[in-house]
Image: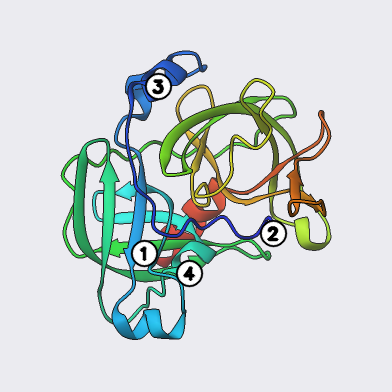
């Protein structure tokens, strides 16, 4: 899979007890993250399906900037074909609560290749919780945790901040090493747009890309992550979003 492509088509989203077990093992108390990250899915209409044969929808992860505003990766909103003009139904799932809410793009933000999208909901999501955004930079080896809907299920994955990208295509990004035990692909399909929390529960970054390589084999390509000790996830620092969003108000 190209790292850029973190969309999952047609997710069946389930919230199990494993979610709470993993969260308790992280550096953040479970109650600090409840109702802040959600799964977002958009199912295409007949005309859109005809234009994209074989695809019936697209999904990713998002988080609440407010009860009526969601943040995700820009390529997630693009894959959903959301627009600034006109509302399109977006399925939002938070735990056992799933609602279909009309949504549209407010704006995209970011100076580099990786960008964020702010999505407006036509009505507020009742259980939404807006986590604080971290305004200070992360330091190398700071612990971080993400709550992402990977493979159709919510998954809490820990890791560390490595560094900020400062040149080329990495300029403006935050490079992370995320893993669950020996699983370096724990953050994968569907994780685009997921919030990355520091150990105080503040959102420090937003996941946009998983770094992988694909090697050909007899039964098809085999995807592998980067080497231990190196970044395997790209993200956009969340303070960029807060600064640009505040300036636009």
Q: In this rendering, which labeled residue sits more in front, label 2 or label 1? A: 2
Precedes in sequence: disc 2 or disc 1: 2
Placement of the C terminus among the 4 image quadrants: bottom left
Residue at x 32%, y 21% (from the top left corner): 31
Whether pointer 3 and pointer 2 mark residues with C-beta atoms closer than 8 Å, the reply is no
Say which residue label 1 marks. Answer: 249
Local SS, label 4: helix
Q: In this rendering, which labeled residue sits more in front, label 1 or label 3? A: 3
Q: How are the residues colored?
A: rainbow
Rendered location of residue 154, percent (x, y): 41, 36
Precedes in sequence: disc 4 or disc 3: 3
242 versus 224 height, above or below: below
Whether pointer 4 and pointer 3 mark residues with C-beta atoms closer than 8 Å, the reply is no
- 54 sits to left or right of 48: right
Residue neighbourhood size for the residue with mark 3, other residues' Cα within 10 Å, grouped as few (<14), some (14–19), many (≥20): few
Query: How far apart are the alpha carbons under marks 2 and 1?
Result: 35 Å
Query: How far apart are the alpha carbons under marks 3 and 2?
Result: 28 Å
Query: How far apart are the alpha carbons under marks 4 and 3?
Result: 29 Å
Rendered location of residue 20, percent (x, y): 37, 20
Say which residue label 3 marks. Answer: 18
Precedes in sequence: disc 1 or disc 3: 3
Precedes in sequence: disc 3 or disc 2: 2
Residue at x 43%, y 14% (from the top left corner): 24
Query: How far apart are the alpha carbons under marks 1 and 3?
Result: 40 Å
Residue at x 24%, y 49% (from the top left corner): 67
Residue at x 59%, y 36% (from the top left corner): 136
Say which residue label 4 marks. Answer: 79
Residue neighbourhood size for the residue with mark 1, other residues' Cα within 10 Å, grouped as few (<14), some (14–19), many (≥20): few
Say which residue label 2 marks. Answer: 2
Query: How far apart are the alpha carbons under marks 4 and 2?
Result: 15 Å
Residue 69 or residue 154, whichever sits in front = 154
């Amino acid at each position: 899979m190209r790292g850029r492509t973190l969309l999952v088509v047609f997710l069946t989203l389930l919230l199990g007890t494993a979610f709470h077990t993993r969260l308790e093992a992280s550096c953040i108390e479970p109650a600090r993250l409840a109702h802040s990250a959600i799964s977002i899915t958009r199912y295409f209409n007949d005309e859109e399906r005809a234009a994209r044969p074989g695809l019936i929808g697209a999904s990713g992860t998002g988080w609440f900037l407010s009860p009526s505003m969601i943040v995700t990766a820009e390529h997630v909103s693009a894959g959903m074909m959301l627009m600034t003009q006109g509302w399109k139904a977006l399925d939002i799932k938070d735990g056992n609560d799933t609602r279909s809410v009309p949504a549209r793009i407010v704006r995209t933000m970011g100076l580099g290749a990786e960008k964020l999208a702010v999505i407006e909901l036509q009505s507020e999501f009742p259980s939404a919780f807006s986590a604080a955004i971290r305004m200070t930079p992360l330091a190398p080896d700071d612990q971080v945790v993400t709550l992402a809907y990977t493979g159709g299920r919510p998954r809490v994955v820990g890791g560390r901040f490595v560094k900020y990208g400062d040149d080329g295509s990495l300029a403006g990004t935050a490079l992370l090493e995320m893993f669950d035990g020996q699983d370096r692909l724990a953050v994968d399909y569907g994780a685009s747009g997921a919030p990355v929390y520091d150990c105080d529960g503040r959102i420090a970054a937003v996941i946009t890309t998983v770094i992988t390589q694909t090697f050909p084999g007899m039964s098809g390509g085999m995807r592998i992550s980067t080497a231990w000790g190196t970044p395997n996830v790209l993200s956009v620092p969340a303070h960029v979003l807060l600064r640009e969003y505040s300036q636009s108000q």
